[in-house]
Image (cartoon, coloured by chain):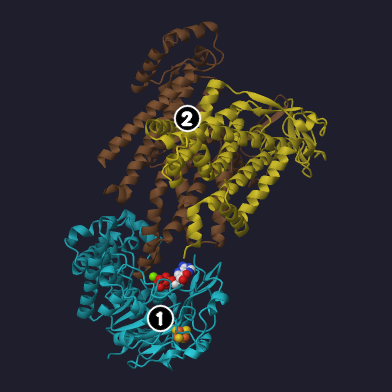
Amino acid sequence: MSEPILKISDLSTSFFTNEGQINAVDSISLSIDQGEVFGIVGESGSGKSVTALSLMDLVESPGEITSGSISYRNAELADTLREEYPDAVDGAFVDILSVPESVRRSLRGPSFSMIFQDPESSFNPSVTVGEQVAEAVEVQRRARSNPRSTHAKTRGVEYSLSGYLTSAVLPSKRFVTTESKERAIELLEMVGIPDPIKRANEYPHQYSGGMLQRAMIAQALAGEPDILIADEPTTALDVTIQAQVLDILSELQEDVGMTILLITHNLGVVARMCDRVGVMYAGEIVEQGTLEDIFEHNIHPYTAGLMGSIPALDNVGGRLHPIEGNVPSLLDSEMRDGCYFADRCPKAMEECLTKPQAFDGPGSEDHAAMCYLATHEYEEEQALPDTYFDSSTEVMTDD
Amino acid sequence: MISDRVKSNLKQSLSESILPKIGLVLFIVIIFMALFAPVLATHDPTSTGYFDPESGSAYPPLGHSYDTEIAVDGEFTAVTVEANSTHLLGTNTVGQDVYSRLLYGARVSVIVGISATLLAMLIGVPIGLLAGYYGGRVDDGLMRVADTMLAFPALVLALALIGVFGERPIEIPDPIVMAGFADGMPETIPIPGTVTIVGALVIWVWFARVARGEAMSLRNAEYVKAAKSFGTSNTRILLKHVLPNSMTPIIVLATIQVAVIILLEASLAYLGFSGTTLSWGYEIERGQDYLRRRPWVSIFPGIGIMLAVISVNLLGDWFRDALDPNIDQSKRGA
Amino acid sequence: MLKFLFRRLLQGILVIWGAITILFVLRAFSPGDPAVLMAGEGADDAYIEQVRQAEGLDEPLLSQYFEYLLNIMVGDFGFSWEARREVEAIVIGRVPATVELAVAATVVALVIAIPLGVISGTRRNEPADYGATLFSLLGISTPNFWLGLMLILVFGVWYGIPYPSIGTSSFSLGGFAVEYPNSVGLGLFDFPTGRREIGFAAAVSALVFEQSVSELGTWVRYITLPALTLGTYFTALITRLTRSGMIDELGKPYVTSMEAKGLPRALILYKHTLRNTMIPIITVIGLQIGTLAGGAVITETVFNWPGLGLRLIDALNARDWPVIQGIVLFIAIAFVVINIIVDALYNYLDPQVRES
Ligand SMILES: Nc1ncnc2c1ncn2[C@@H]1O[C@H](COP(=O)(O)OP(=O)(O)O)[C@@H](O)[C@H]1O
Ligand code: SF4
Ligand SMILES: [Mg+2]
């Protein structure tokens, strides 16, 4: 197919809390092609959202990206940065983790944008929806029309307290211009909000959840991003509305050829939307491949477990609990050596007590699984006794 | 009444932050000063015998002897004001020992602060519980009274009440002196009685409001409903279930109100409406006309008030942070 | 919105009625003779009798009550037998000084507290945050009369305490030297203590009609220390509220979503989080007007600032009940009115309330 637009390798993100270090993303590697929909599935708590935030560089303290690289293909950006940051640029790819904060900030909007799970809490309740969408338009408009060299584009939009104070007195100095407002209304119309002129002046609490999620999509599209990250975009919505929102996303993807990273815990959504899929467990991508690889030729018992529990499409709100037990706490001190899934794995073997690497899978050439079953069949005589982890883990007791 | 969870939260925030520790230490020091004032004092705080007639002036604190010109009978004369080694913090403008008065001032502040708050609790909590528990007209009435009371600023209302009732001190005997542990100290100390009562009248509304809110939310709690279905009497439910469970916010409020009362007492004494002179606030007033040459007379009692109020405020913050279940969750939630 | 205002207004009237009733009850059931209370200290028997007749203190309580209510409704706050003047005239004459002081203190508080709160809320656990936290702890714990004196003292230090010799009056009183500085400061900036030379209105009109700045300068010099004294508690309180409000607000998911769309940090801070933080703080400020009034009584006494508070203390010293109740009632009414305005403002600013 087409070339990759994003190559993530060995990305790790940890939270340094009072209880200890939590490795929410544990050296994951993936590659996403231009124009495809890449899905990430996994139970709640497996590190999907933190992965998305890491890509956006929005991980908040006490969290920190501890290692890895995120190479983003953008020839223009690469040319601009090549001289100043030769280490960060490789051909048309830029490692966005090696460029300064201001450059990464300037990528939000035109390069990456994000849709969040809960539309209601993702808008400021005391500013109109139209204004908030228009802000996103304005940031991009200013970045693009920056009269200085393209270099300036990577500096982000300047704004200061004095700017805000002037705008309070002089309406003409407001951040959001009329043009941006008009564009915002167009965007709202594009995502199927009826009567967008009127609705643009309404506040978030006057919107229904589905309408607000559409508005958030409109907002994310304002900068015409290369990559749209959608973190469980339909989880908070009613079933019928979910389908509508997914329709909008697929239409956009087809019309504009946008690359979408779709995060979900719903395999139905994956089957419907995605070209390729990564299965996430305990901060790791335990299996990845094409839709067919994952649904037909899956290797990892966790993936198989997820399949066994595809919720019927009319019950998509339900959480995945495919296999007995819980996602581990991800606390560094409590993680055991070996496969993280071993304590829940029905096929755990002795060798699973040492960490498996990502082996090639039997499916397409992209297919890979972090499981010894990719290298050989299950050997019953090697099986760990059922009670093996009962004694060695004290934290896993459930009441 | 105080659950294990509360206790462990209190311990945790005590160990996590420096501020509650400072508050606790200050509080203990001030209580200690107040309790043992007669023993710790070096002079009778009311005796004016240390006035130096020659300089027409009060003694400065240790190490602060200075030369000055003083007008005596219309003539300016050069004098040296010598520090007197028995007066640690100097003497005030009528020759009383500042250090000893500082200790007794702590006593007055603590007694007024705690007793007015307890009195306000005694008035406010039952009224609030009844109003919240029964709801309806009683409740409406209470809320109107509360709104009305809150329209008067505390100090202004206190002044109005004093305008009507006057100001009366209550002499309370000092057990330490009576028991013979501190000879030469006054046998009774005057506590501003009107101020105590007026303080309670000014702040009881807050207790009523908080108790009402708690009672309202507990009214529909499962265990209260269950108790009702067993035919438990309302009085019993109020005393056994509602009151103990609303204690947490009431304790937090009481802590903060002690600080309010200490400031109120000091302000009234400063304005000269507390009816007593043995008070930090009054000392500040007394020193203010001599601020430039004898600043210590006003400075030390002011520091006393400030530290007392800081300690109580810090304790209040500590209790609030540790006892508020919402904060508890947000700290842990991931 | 209109319906809300109407309801709020009705509620306010009820509270004012309650306040009037409380003051009446206080007088009617005061432990002493109400005629003595009304006549003030130092009135002789004949004068007390005259007051009793004139005020109708022999009449049944209920008719006294209605008369009192009716009088207040038409703006007649009573007569001060002590000062021999109408109470409302006394009150009105003192209002501008207090309003100027209160507004100046509020402005000082807002100007200092909001940036301080924002800095401290956005740089948690950095030195700036510790500084602001310490400041607000001291600010809410310091008695303001003492603070006023310390300001006088500290500004005096520039002259070299304990022997400043400029700008003080020193005279002998029964063997004691009375010394209370008339002004303190840095020479260039002397801050007078103990007077109010010119009102704000007069200062502004001098500026507008005579293009003369010096009046306004005088006004500023006179009000600086009292406003700082009165404003400190308020500053500390608003700093605290702004800090915790900002922390709350910055933790909300919409902030992440705004970061994701590439908004400049300053825009998120000021246009979104600070605005949302200020909406509830406005209500707190309204409720704290009472504290401000109480503080004004003290501050005016310290600085001899001729406002309502100082007059209240004078009236209390003279046991002049009509003036006491007049000023107390005026403050209560002002509190109610200001809070109605604040509530209306709150409703206007918070769309969740406004649009529903
Ligand atoms: N702000 C945070 N502080 C501490 N731990 C966090 C924070 N955010 C996420 N985590 C940890 O990261 C792990 C993965 O979380 P997340 O990415 O939200 O899971 P998912 O989106 O797959 O449900 C969780 O176990 C959680 O404990
Ligand atoms: S590596 Fe072993 S324990 Fe882990 S999933 Fe594969 S079979 Fe199960
Ligand atoms: Mg998530």
What label does residue C31 carry, if any? Answer: none
Furthest toward the left, the residue is: A195
Q: Which chain is brown?
A: C
> How far apart in space, not on screen, are marks 1 and 2 (Cα)?
77 Å
State the image coordinates of residue C183 (x, y, percent, origin top left): 58, 39
Query: Mark 1 belongs to which amino acid?
Result: Tyr
The answer to whether residue C296 is above or below residue A220 is above
Is C340 above or below relative to C139?
above
**Viewer can see residue C25:** yes
At which x and y percent is residue A261?
32, 78
Q: Is mark 1 within 8 Å of ligand 2?
A: yes
* Towards the viewer: A262 or A219: A262
- The quarter of the rendered structure image containing the N terminus of chain C is top left
In the image, taking residue A23 as reference, residue C346 lies left or right, namely left
Instruction: Assess whether mark 2 and mark 1 are in contact (beta carbons under 8 angstroms).
Output: no
Which residue is drawn at the image coordinates 53% and 78% (left, top)? A387
State the SS at label 2. helix
Residue at (49, 67) in percent of width and height: A398
**Residue tagged 1:** A302
Neighbourhood count class around disc 1 (C-alpha, 10 Å): few under 14, some 14–19, many 20 upward: many
Labelled disc at residue C308: 2
Could you tell me residue C285's position as x and y percent? 43, 43
Left of A338 or right of it: where is A255? left
Q: Quadrant of residue C205?
A: top left
Chain that the image shows in cyan: A
Q: Nearer the viewer, residue B233 or C100?
A: B233
Q: Secondary structure at mark 1?
A: helix
Task: Write down the colour of chain B.
Answer: yellow
Task: Find residue B275 and report its image quarter.
Answer: top right
Give the vertical position of A226 relative to B147 (above or below): below
